[in-house]
Amino acid sequence: MIGIGIAGIAGRMGHLLAAQVRTTPGATLTGGIDRAPAANAERMLPDIAALAAASDVVIDFTHAGAVRAHAEALTAANTAWVLGTTGLDSEGQEAVRVAARAIPVMQAANYSPGVALVIALAERLGAALPASDYDAEILETHHRQKVDAPSGTALAIGEAVARGRGHALAGAMESGRHGQTGPRQPGAIGFASLRAGQVVGEHTLLFASASEQITLQHQALDRGAFAAGAIRAAVWLHGRPAGLYGMPDVLGLR
């Protein structure tokens, strides 16, 4: 039996994850932590150290500011870590890399199997369609409560395109165009973000040349897809050697 703990259990995603664990054969919910201590009190543990000690795997959909503390606690307890938090700064990402030297860490901007496949295809398309001929643009839409833009998933798609083209995203990214921007820069990877209503998540990758257009799109219809993918990742990660893994590993794409 795999003991799964949830960091952020009182949130919308946390509730979905808890429900998914309860229906997963061979898994049990060890408890959770959250900044709202009254929520789901019968399963609430006092802190990340206690959750790590009680669990074989901790699924973490919290906030970027907690990543370093969580990395230290999970490493100290030798507990596997499924990380879905996005918006990490360089220090937060370095904390993840350091943790992965000691424990198995699964990191993904999006745990939908469909999105993992889109990211894999984005890299192949980036490699096959030369930047000199094909402009790459990424459009993402999310609910009005989302606080970061572009989304972590959109950035992951852009990074995949850049990898396919043999360079880093940082030097090619164009986001938030406004006013007299001048012509599009050759080789740029463009981003546009929409925030409206309660859209779960939509991502579109567009490649356009002078003579054709290729569109790759993913629409999340229910957040349950993310929860199911994260639980699948947790079960897969349990018992693996230390290292930094991604959803392509879970799906057998690499």
Image (tube, rainbow, N blue to C red):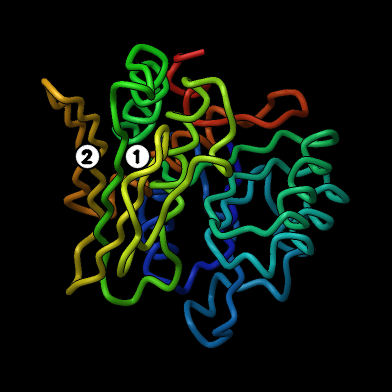
**Which label belongs to residue 218?**
2
The residue located at (20%, 25%) in the rendering is 209
Residue shown at the point (40%, 50%) measured from the top left: 22
Front-most of 118 and 107?
A: 118
Q: Secondary structure at mark 1?
A: loop
Q: Tag 1 or tag 2, which sits nearer the N-term?
A: 1
Image side of residue 58 versus residue 41, left or right: right
The residue lying at 25 percent from left, 65 percent from top is 194
Specify the quadrant of the image occupied by residue 60: bottom right
Task: Estimate the x, y position of residue 121 in percent, counting from the top left.
Answer: 34, 21
Q: Is residue 200 left or right of residue 6?
A: left
Above or below 214: residue 56: below
Mark 2 vs mark 1, foreground winner is 2
The quadrant the N terminus occupies is top right
Give the percent coordinates (x, y) of residue 74: 78, 51
- Establish if 147 lies above or below 206: below
Q: Which residue is mark 1?
A: 112
- Relative image position of residue 215 (x, y in whole percent): 17, 31
Horizontal placement of 28 versus 136: left or right? Answer: right
Tag 2, which secondary structure?
A: strand
Mark 2: amino acid: His
Quarter of image, res 236 = top right
